[in-house]
Image (spheres, coloured by chain):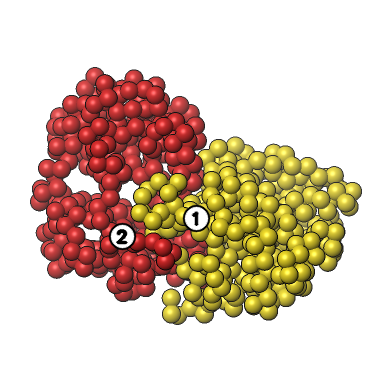
Chain colours: A yellow, B red
Amino acid sequence: MSELQFPPGAAFIDGGFAKIEDAKISVLDWGFLRSDATYDVVHVWKGRFFRLDAHLDRFLSSAEKLRMKLPYDRAQIAEILAELVERTGFEDAYVEMIVTRGVSPTFSRDPRDAINRFIAFAIPFGWILRPEEREEGLALAVSEIPRIPPESVDPTVKNYHWLDLVMGMFDAYEQGARTCILTDGQGNITEGPGFNVFVVKDGKVATPMRGVLHGITRQASILLLQELQVPVSARPVSLHELREADEVFATSTAGGVMPVTKIGAHIVAGGKPGPITGRLIEAYWAAHTRDDGWSVAVKDVARGNLRG
Amino acid sequence: MSELQFPPGAAFIDGGFAKIEDAKISVLDWGFLRSDATYDVVHVWKGRFFRLDAHLDRFLSSAEKLRMKLPYDRAQIAEILAELVERTGFEDAYVEMIVTRGVSPTFSRDPRDAINRFIAFAIPFGWILRPEEREEGLALAVSEIPRIPPESVDPTVKNYHWLDLVMGMFDAYEQGARTCILTDGQGNITEGPGFNVFVVKDGKVATPMRGVLHGITRQASILLLQELQVPVSARPVSLHELREADEVFATSTAGGVMPVTKIGAHIVAGGKPGPITGRLIEAYWAAHTRDDGWSVAVKDVARGNLRG
């Protein structure tokens, strides 16, 4: 990979800090050979972690559901993430924490024998949208490929089982869209590669309940809409509702709340971000400086104070 | 991972040969972060590749279905695999070839921008069964977790989406079994972690047709049963048929044809490998020295002669 310009950043691997280009795992790690891993991504905006508690809660819960043992406790993980950001000097960053099954010392096939591995890295804040799309909105296409069902792989455990989403992205490119949304194979929408989706109709907001990651930005959006006194519910959302919606938006740590203005050939909300989407985007970014548990300064976390 | 004793072996990565412990991929490779990869595993027995053509066919087809470009052609890949085996000096080996999506030089999220990576490694021949189980047979348990359906992820593209299988293995351990078999969620069996399953009833053999990897050992078993004039079909196989079977066996490159003698608490065929399973095992190992396209000497492949 000598031809690559790695993004600036820092990593934590094998118990120590490393350059991002040196953050590598063995091809024998079950985290690669079986995608037997879970992860979480928290972002830092203007020197503050956003919703760090919620990300740590989910990460610890995901590891437990996969019966993995983290070599660090919650406070230690928080300090590692903060130190990673401090090492990069980034004001805005994207910080990923990972636990893989690892390998067993004898290379047995039994996952109970494996020594689980913790990895983390910080890179510049990433956007799903290109800069111009933040104003214009995102062009989505619906792929015929159904999302891996929750009965097979628990989507509340954030995971790397993305081949359905990746093939859906190729479908979307062929339809001239920027990214995809998958269905549940039964006429309801689920999620896209790295984001949840919301629809707005007659002033009411809904987002799929089942077969999707319970995104932290999704949860933040639900809380903020409630504060804005906009009715919002998590329930099955049909493809028909997606196409008939007054407004559609996507939520992701990589970009926040993003207006969707096109679904296939169908123009949503006259091709412009709608009013509820606009109010939510404003509330979302304003929440980044709230200190009532929504955000915490990186420097405070680095000093062992998760609550700032 | 300094505490690990890596298995003896050799690897090919980043365009050159390397020690197995140095075969590492960047944590930023989509092959890891999205499990956006495909692979194949061929084995060598007594200095001969078994069904190399079939494995190469499937690997090239899998890469194409995922719209990946291999940096080497079929003949070059075969030579790399043979050189890996020659470097280890193994008479019996397990040789894995992998292509990952890689990363794009700009780290864009678009898979079309990524430079696909080829990796291969050779390690000692691996068995799913412990030595004593080769005589006694394998104890399986049925997990309630349904296998990822073929509509979501094409199982004919050999892939690392194994969290359903891994969680099924934990279910199996709780039932006192050695490994698991998953269903399709509709009363039919599919496959286990790394193996296909066959049932025998009244002298007729059947194996699931849909929602399973089209294993090379599965295909070899079908061909060998046909040569033995045992009726065999690929069709839906119900859980009921599994439990009522006269004989059950599993097939995998990692171990060949393996008798299954226990399913949960249920003893199959009196707890001993059945007669058709026995005949197939004999034919399977005999086929390893056949030179009618079934096997080819490693040294011939290393000299560029895939047909021996």
Residue at 40%, 54% in the rendered image:
A104
**Tag shown at residue B139:** none
Q: Secondary structure at mark 1?
A: strand
**Tag shown at residue B7:** 2
Identity of the residue furthest to the front in this view? B3
Of the 4 image quadrants, the one containing the N terminus of chain B is bottom left
Q: Is residue A187 above or below residue B66?
A: above
Same chain assignment for discs 2 and 1: no
Separation of residues labelled 2 and 1 (CA atoms): 18 Å
Q: Secondary structure at mark 2?
A: loop
The crowd level at tag 1 (other Cα within 10 Å; few <14, some 14-19, many 20+) is many
Q: Is residue A85 left or right of residue A227?
A: left
Which amino acid lies under the numbered mark 1 shown in the image of this protein? Asn
Of the 4 image quadrants, the one containing the C terminus of chain B is bottom left
Q: Position of residue A96 (x, y in %)?
A: 61, 63
Q: Is residue B244 above or below residue A39?
A: above
Q: Is residue B249 left or right of residue B282?
A: right
The residue wearing badge 1 is A116
Is residue A268 visible to us here?
Answer: no
Q: Chain of mark 2?
A: B
Q: Chain of mark 1?
A: A
Identity of the residue furthest to the right in this view? A229
Q: Is residue B192 left or right of residue A18?
A: left
Foreground residue among A165 and A262? A165
Q: Quadrant of residue B117?
A: bottom left
Residue at 68%, 60% in the rendered image:
A75
Is residue A221 visible to us here?
Answer: yes
Q: Position of residue A188 (x, y in %)?
A: 64, 40
Residue at 24%, 26% in the rendered image:
B272
Which amino acid lies under the numbered mark 2 shown in the image of this protein? Pro
Residue at 45%, 46% in the rendered image:
A112
Q: Quadrant of residue B82?
A: bottom left
